[in-house]
């Protein structure tokens, strides 16, 4: 079964399973998913921040960031949030997340972007000839 045959919710679940290792221990970032014809074409994660002090990279603490149970909850939230997507098949979904250090809590926000290609529908809206006649 190819991706184009899977429901979008199952594709989102697959994406988060693929990113699980990257998400675990991440402090914050954005998961980006590009969609065309209700099929995921491209996905990834932007991690931020990576701290640098006096020209040296600071090693992140292993205990900081998302835990495995939090990553699983994040995945479920991403699938459940698809109920908010309405009537579009092309676009992008971005999940911004962050972990509050020492609090053990995390938060996420979801942004949908729908894309339309006017080349596909312009021909439908061409004005009709209104019967204007040359008066010369």
Image (cartoon, rainbow, N blue to C red):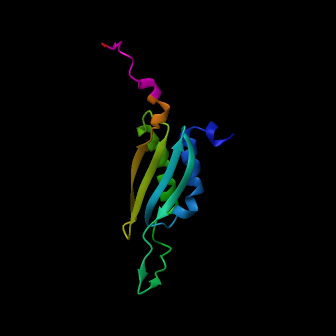
Foreground of the two, 83 or 68? 83
Q: Residue at x 38, y 70 (%)?
A: 101
Q: Look at the magenta stretch and give its main secondary structure.
A: loop
Residue 44 location (% of width, % of height): 53, 57
Pick out the residue farthest to the front.
136
Residue 45 location (% of width, % of height): 50, 59
Q: Total marks drawn?
A: 0
Q: Residue at x 48, y 62 (%)?
A: 46
Residue 72 location (% of width, % of height): 52, 54
Q: Residue at x 36, y 12 (%)?
A: 131
Viewer can see residue 77: no
Lateral position of residue 71 relative to residue 109, left or right: right
Which span is picked out in magenta? 123-134
Establish if 87 lies above or below 11.
above
The quadrant of the picture occupied by the N terminus is: top right
Foreground of the two, 60 or 62? 60
Establish if 101 lies above or below 41.
below
């Amino acid at each position: 079964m190819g991706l184009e045959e899977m429901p979008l919710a199952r594709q989102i679940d697959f994406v988060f399973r693929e990113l699980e290792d990257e998400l675990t221990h991440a402090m914050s970032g954005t998961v980006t998913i590009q969609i065309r014809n209700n099929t995921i074409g491209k996905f990834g994660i932007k991690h931020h921040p990576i701290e640098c002090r006096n020209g040296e990279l600071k090693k992140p603490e292993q205990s900081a960031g998302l835990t495995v149970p939090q990553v699983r909850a994040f995945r479920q939230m991403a699938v459940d949030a698809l109920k908010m997507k309405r009537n579009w098949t092309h676009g992008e979904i971005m999940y911004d997340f962050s972990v509050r250090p020492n609090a053990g809590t995390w938060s996420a926000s979801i942004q949908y972007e729908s894309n339309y290609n006017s080349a596909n529908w312009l021909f439908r809206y061409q004005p009709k000839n209104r019967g204007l006649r040359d008066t010369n």
